[in-house]
Amino acid sequence: MIYWEIFIAFFIPGIVGYGGGPASIPLVEKEVVDRFGWMSVNDFSEMLAMANALPGPIATKMAGYIGFEQGGILGAIIGVFATVAPSLILMIVLLRILMRFKDSPKVKRMTTLIRPTIAILLGVMAFSFFQTSYIDSGIWQMLAIAIVSFILMERLKVHPAFVIVASLVYGAVFLG
Protein backbone atom coordinates (compact mmCIF):
# COMPACT_ATOMS: atom_id res chain seq x y z
CA MET A 1 0.00 0.00 0.00
CA ILE A 2 2.87 2.42 0.76
CA TYR A 3 4.16 2.16 -2.81
CA TRP A 4 0.76 3.11 -4.20
CA GLU A 5 0.64 6.08 -1.81
CA ILE A 6 4.13 7.17 -2.89
CA PHE A 7 3.04 6.95 -6.52
CA ILE A 8 -0.11 9.01 -5.88
CA ALA A 9 1.76 11.56 -3.76
CA PHE A 10 4.03 12.45 -6.70
CA PHE A 11 1.89 11.61 -9.72
CA ILE A 12 -0.89 14.07 -8.83
CA PRO A 13 1.48 17.06 -8.39
CA GLY A 14 3.14 16.01 -11.64
CA ILE A 15 -0.18 16.26 -13.46
CA VAL A 16 -1.51 19.50 -11.97
CA GLY A 17 1.84 21.18 -11.21
CA TYR A 18 2.07 23.21 -14.41
CA GLY A 19 5.32 25.14 -14.41
CA GLY A 20 7.79 22.42 -13.46
CA GLY A 21 9.37 21.46 -10.15
CA PRO A 22 9.12 24.79 -8.31
CA ALA A 23 5.42 25.04 -9.13
CA SER A 24 4.80 21.55 -7.76
CA ILE A 25 6.53 22.14 -4.39
CA PRO A 26 3.35 23.30 -2.60
CA LEU A 27 1.41 20.41 -4.13
CA VAL A 28 3.99 17.88 -2.96
CA GLU A 29 3.96 19.48 0.50
CA LYS A 30 0.17 19.14 0.63
CA GLU A 31 0.41 15.43 -0.19
CA VAL A 32 3.43 14.60 1.98
CA VAL A 33 2.62 16.73 5.04
CA ASP A 34 -1.16 17.09 5.10
CA ARG A 35 -2.54 14.05 3.29
CA PHE A 36 -0.13 11.25 4.23
CA GLY A 37 1.59 12.80 7.28
CA TRP A 38 5.03 11.48 6.34
CA MET A 39 6.79 14.70 7.38
CA SER A 40 6.21 17.76 9.49
CA VAL A 41 6.30 21.19 7.87
CA ASN A 42 9.73 21.73 9.45
CA ASP A 43 11.08 18.42 8.11
CA PHE A 44 9.70 19.21 4.67
CA SER A 45 11.34 22.64 4.63
CA GLU A 46 14.68 21.13 5.68
CA MET A 47 14.39 18.48 2.97
CA LEU A 48 13.50 21.19 0.45
CA ALA A 49 16.55 23.22 1.45
CA MET A 50 18.77 20.15 1.03
CA ALA A 51 17.18 19.35 -2.35
CA ASN A 52 17.73 22.94 -3.52
CA ALA A 53 21.41 22.70 -2.65
CA LEU A 54 21.93 19.69 -4.94
CA PRO A 55 22.10 19.91 -8.74
CA GLY A 56 19.22 18.67 -10.85
CA PRO A 57 15.44 19.01 -11.00
CA ILE A 58 13.90 19.75 -7.62
CA ALA A 59 10.78 17.59 -8.04
CA THR A 60 12.72 14.40 -8.77
CA LYS A 61 15.10 15.01 -5.87
CA MET A 62 12.18 15.47 -3.49
CA ALA A 63 10.47 12.36 -4.88
CA GLY A 64 13.62 10.29 -4.57
CA TYR A 65 14.32 11.39 -1.01
CA ILE A 66 10.77 11.06 0.30
CA GLY A 67 10.21 7.83 -1.61
CA PHE A 68 13.39 6.37 -0.11
CA GLU A 69 12.42 7.49 3.41
CA GLN A 70 9.00 5.86 3.09
CA GLY A 71 9.69 2.78 0.97
CA GLY A 72 13.41 2.24 0.56
CA ILE A 73 15.04 1.95 -2.84
CA LEU A 74 11.84 0.74 -4.51
CA GLY A 75 10.00 3.70 -2.96
CA ALA A 76 12.59 6.11 -4.39
CA ILE A 77 12.24 4.54 -7.84
CA ILE A 78 8.45 4.73 -7.68
CA GLY A 79 8.53 8.34 -6.46
CA VAL A 80 10.87 9.48 -9.24
CA PHE A 81 8.89 7.56 -11.86
CA ALA A 82 5.61 9.04 -10.62
CA THR A 83 7.12 12.53 -10.91
CA VAL A 84 8.21 12.12 -14.53
CA ALA A 85 5.32 9.85 -15.64
CA PRO A 86 2.85 12.66 -16.53
CA SER A 87 5.40 14.35 -18.80
CA LEU A 88 6.44 11.01 -20.25
CA ILE A 89 2.85 10.03 -21.03
CA LEU A 90 2.12 13.41 -22.60
CA MET A 91 5.29 13.21 -24.69
CA ILE A 92 4.35 9.75 -25.98
CA VAL A 93 0.82 10.91 -26.87
CA LEU A 94 2.09 14.05 -28.61
CA LEU A 95 4.75 12.05 -30.46
CA ARG A 96 2.08 9.65 -31.74
CA ILE A 97 0.00 12.58 -32.96
CA LEU A 98 3.04 14.13 -34.60
CA MET A 99 3.99 10.83 -36.25
CA ARG A 100 0.43 10.41 -37.55
CA PHE A 101 0.58 13.81 -39.26
CA LYS A 102 4.31 13.84 -40.12
CA ASP A 103 3.62 14.05 -43.85
CA SER A 104 1.23 16.96 -43.44
CA PRO A 105 2.51 20.22 -44.98
CA LYS A 106 1.50 22.10 -41.82
CA VAL A 107 3.58 19.81 -39.59
CA LYS A 108 6.55 20.05 -41.98
CA ARG A 109 6.26 23.85 -41.93
CA MET A 110 6.05 23.83 -38.12
CA THR A 111 9.20 21.72 -37.75
CA THR A 112 10.97 23.89 -40.31
CA LEU A 113 10.13 26.96 -38.24
CA ILE A 114 11.15 25.34 -34.95
CA ARG A 115 14.69 24.42 -36.08
CA PRO A 116 16.00 28.03 -36.28
CA THR A 117 14.44 28.78 -32.90
CA ILE A 118 16.24 25.83 -31.33
CA ALA A 119 19.49 26.87 -33.02
CA ILE A 120 19.16 30.38 -31.59
CA LEU A 121 18.38 29.05 -28.11
CA LEU A 122 21.43 26.75 -28.26
CA GLY A 123 23.56 29.67 -29.45
CA VAL A 124 22.36 31.88 -26.59
CA MET A 125 23.07 29.07 -24.14
CA ALA A 126 26.58 28.55 -25.56
CA PHE A 127 27.26 32.29 -25.37
CA SER A 128 26.09 32.30 -21.76
CA PHE A 129 28.41 29.38 -20.95
CA PHE A 130 31.36 31.13 -22.59
CA GLN A 131 30.56 34.36 -20.76
CA THR A 132 30.36 32.58 -17.40
CA SER A 133 33.55 30.66 -18.16
CA TYR A 134 35.35 33.87 -19.11
CA ILE A 135 34.26 35.60 -15.90
CA ASP A 136 35.05 32.62 -13.64
CA SER A 137 38.30 31.33 -15.13
CA GLY A 138 39.67 33.95 -17.51
CA ILE A 139 40.10 34.18 -21.25
CA TRP A 140 43.16 31.92 -21.54
CA GLN A 141 41.72 29.06 -19.51
CA MET A 142 38.44 29.31 -21.39
CA LEU A 143 40.13 29.32 -24.80
CA ALA A 144 42.47 26.46 -23.88
CA ILE A 145 39.60 24.25 -22.69
CA ALA A 146 37.48 25.13 -25.75
CA ILE A 147 40.30 24.46 -28.24
CA VAL A 148 41.44 21.22 -26.60
CA SER A 149 37.82 20.03 -26.36
CA PHE A 150 37.24 20.84 -30.03
CA ILE A 151 40.37 18.96 -31.10
CA LEU A 152 39.55 15.95 -28.93
CA MET A 153 35.97 15.65 -30.18
CA GLU A 154 36.26 16.71 -33.82
CA ARG A 155 39.74 15.57 -34.83
CA LEU A 156 40.45 12.64 -32.51
CA LYS A 157 36.78 11.54 -32.19
CA VAL A 158 36.89 11.24 -28.39
CA HIS A 159 33.41 10.75 -26.93
CA PRO A 160 31.99 14.00 -25.43
CA ALA A 161 31.41 12.32 -22.06
CA PHE A 162 35.15 11.71 -21.68
CA VAL A 163 35.89 15.32 -22.67
CA ILE A 164 33.41 16.57 -20.06
CA VAL A 165 34.93 14.36 -17.35
CA ALA A 166 38.44 15.51 -18.30
CA SER A 167 37.31 19.14 -18.17
CA LEU A 168 35.75 18.60 -14.74
CA VAL A 169 38.97 17.00 -13.47
CA TYR A 170 41.04 19.84 -14.94
CA GLY A 171 38.76 22.41 -13.33
CA ALA A 172 38.86 20.65 -9.96
CA VAL A 173 42.65 20.38 -9.98
CA PHE A 174 43.73 23.65 -11.55
CA LEU A 175 40.80 26.03 -11.13
CA GLY A 176 39.30 24.83 -7.84
Image (tube, grey):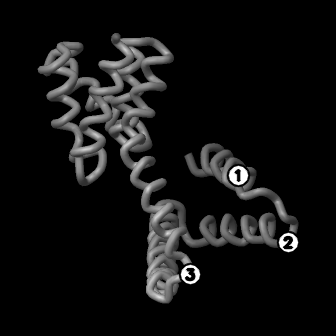
Task: Determine which of the numbered discs, if any, sits on residue 155 in the image.
Answer: 2
* Amino acid type assigned to the residue bearing label 1 in the image: Ala
Task: State yes or no: discs 3 and 2 in contact (Cβ < 8 Å).
Answer: no
Task: Determine which of the numbered discs, if any, sits on residue 161 in the image.
Answer: 1
Task: State yes or no: discs 3 and 1 in contact (Cβ < 8 Å).
Answer: no
Instruction: From the viewer's perspective, tell me whether residue 132 is left or right of residue 53.
Output: right
**Considering the image in quadrants, where does the N terminus appear?**
top left
- Where residue 17 sits in the image (x, y, percent)? 23, 46
Q: Residue at x 32, y 29 (%)?
A: 50
- Where residue 85 sits in the image (x, y, percent)? 41, 40
Query: Which of the two discs, 3 and 2, labels the residue nearer the N terminus?
Result: 3
Query: Which of the two discs, 2 and 1, labels the residue nearer the N terminus?
Result: 2
- Where residue 140 sits in the image (x, y, percent)? 62, 70
Residue under pointer 3: 103
Query: Which of the two discs, 3 and 1, labels the residue nearer the N terminus?
Result: 3
* Amino acid type assigned to the residue bearing label 2 in the image: Arg
The residue nearer to you, when weighing 150 against 105, is 105
* Amino acid type assigned to the residue bearing label 3 in the image: Asp
In 3D space, how far apart are the residues under numbered discs 3 and 2 (Cα atoms)?
A: 37 Å
In 3D space, how far apart are the residues under numbered discs 3 and 1 (Cα atoms)?
A: 35 Å
In 3D space, how far apart are the residues under numbered discs 2 and 1 (Cα atoms)?
A: 16 Å
